[in-house]
Every structure is written in structure tokens, then in C-alpha cells.
Image (cartoon, helix red, strand yellow):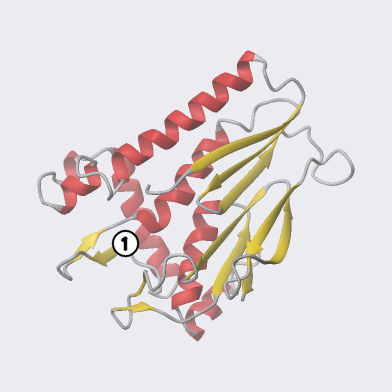
Amino acid sequence: MGMPMSIHLRGDDLARPEVEKAVATAYALLARMDEIFSTWSPDSQVSRLRRGELALSDCDPLVHQAARIGGQAEELTSGAFTTLLPDADGMPRFDPAGLVKGWAVDLAGDELRGLPGVSWCINAGGDVRAGRHQHVPPTGEDAMAWRIGIENPYDRSQIARVVPLTDGAVATSGTAARGAHLFDPHTRQAVGRPGSTSVVGPDLLWSDIWATALFVGGATTRAAFAEHPAYEVVDL
């Protein structure tokens, strides 16, 4: 998926075999999602699909699911999120990268959730998903909360806000790190304005989708977001 990913754990006896197995399974799942969806790899199913070498009907069921999620996201965000992005020649091609990262991390987290006494955090290029075993308390001295810093987009050496997480996600979209790389489906142009939009929510899939949509979208998208109170926006 074109970025580093890391898994971090807190808790009791993290060297026990079931912990090592769960972490290995989570990393294998992330690698499998990258193998299917990466637009950086010419051999991935999505790259072959984009070149016309593979039909959608011949792709892994996960690709079909990504297309369905993308359609749902486009509808919910009033068209501010799309999986049809221009390629190097300006032609619209299926590119689910804007949702696959969060989705893959959520699925990897599911492999860690059953570890007794463990709190976990997955960092995917600065977007974060945290979780815990059901018997790890969500608040208090034993909560093992993760403190997630949101970078100041105008001074990347500074942290603008810290979000404590025991079970949830933080995703950020903006131009500070990668420049004008976000595509506005309405104007058909890249968005180059300064600043950033972060979304804090229960999962990384939809937090990431909403962060992108809110950064590029307008008032209609903001009104649509207001119908989802489980998610909070942080504009900088």
C-alpha cells in the first residue's frame, strides 16, 4: 500500500506463543491485502485490472467488496469520495487505495482483539487504529490508552492535538506531507489548499474515507458527515 505499517502491543507476557501467532497473522493479512490492491505493484490484481489484463469477475472477492464499499462511500459523502481516479494519462481508473489502507488495518486488528490482557495499536503511515481485549478496561489507570498525536500541518515538527485511544481510530488527510495528491471528484482537480482534516472514529476504514471527503468536499459533505455522530472531525 506504499507506506510503512507497524503493530505495537502493551500488556502481560507479550512473548507468549499465541501473541506471536496473532501478530504474524495480522502482518500476513496486511501483506495479502497489499498483494491484491497495491497500485505500486504491477503484478497486483488491481494493477492488472486497471490495465485490462484481468476482468473484475476474475478478481478476488475482496476486490468486489472494495468496489461496493467505494460505491457506498461515494453516496454517503455526497460524491466527495471516489474510487475512480485519473491515471497518468488522465483516464479514470479503479483505485481503491483511499479505503483499502483503513480496511486492511481494521481486519488486521481483528486478529489481535482476542488476546487476553493486551492493548494494541497499528500505525499505517501515520493513521492509527487502536484496540483492546474485552477485559482490558476502556478507562482508568489500567486502560493502557494510546496517545495519538495529530501533526500541525503548518509546522510538522509540532503536535497540534493529542487524542487518547483505547478502542478507535484517527485518520488524517491533507497536503503537508505529500502535496496536492487528493482528488476532488466534483472539480476533477487535485486539491492543493493548506491545512489538514482528521477524523476520530470507531474504525479506520470510515475515519479515513471521511477525512478525505471532508478535506476535499464542501458544505453538502459536511452536512452528510453530521449524520454520523460516532465520528468527530478535527480541522487544522
As drawn, 67 above or below 14: below
Identify the residue shown where x is 54% and y is 52%.
204
Badge 1 marks a residue whose secondary structure is loop
- Picture coordinates of residue 170 (x, y %)? 61, 57
Residues 202 and 13: in front is 13
Q: Which residue is mark 1?
A: 83
Residue 154 appears left or right of 125? right
Residue 75 appears left or right of 134? left
As drawn, 57 above or below 181: above
Identify the residue shown where x is 40% and y is 61%.
72
As drawn, 158 above or below 112: below
Q: Residue furthest top?
A: 17
The answer to which image quadrant residue 85 occupies is bottom left
Residues 78 and 89: in front is 89
Characterize the local packing of mark 1: few (<14), some (14-19) or many (20 or more) Cα atoms within 10 angstroms.
many
Residues 40 and 166: in front is 40
Q: Quadrant of the C terminus?
A: bottom right
As drawn, 19 above or below 129: above
- Picture coordinates of residue 199 (x, y %)? 59, 64
Residue 138 appears left or right of 96? right
- Picture coordinates of residue 67 (x, y %)? 31, 54
The answer to which image quadrant residue 178 occupies is bottom left
Identify the residue shown where x is 45% and y is 79%.
217
- Picture coordinates of residue 218 (x, y %)? 47, 83
Identify the residue shown where x is 50% and y is 42%.
5
* Amino acid type, residue under disc 1 in the picture: Thr
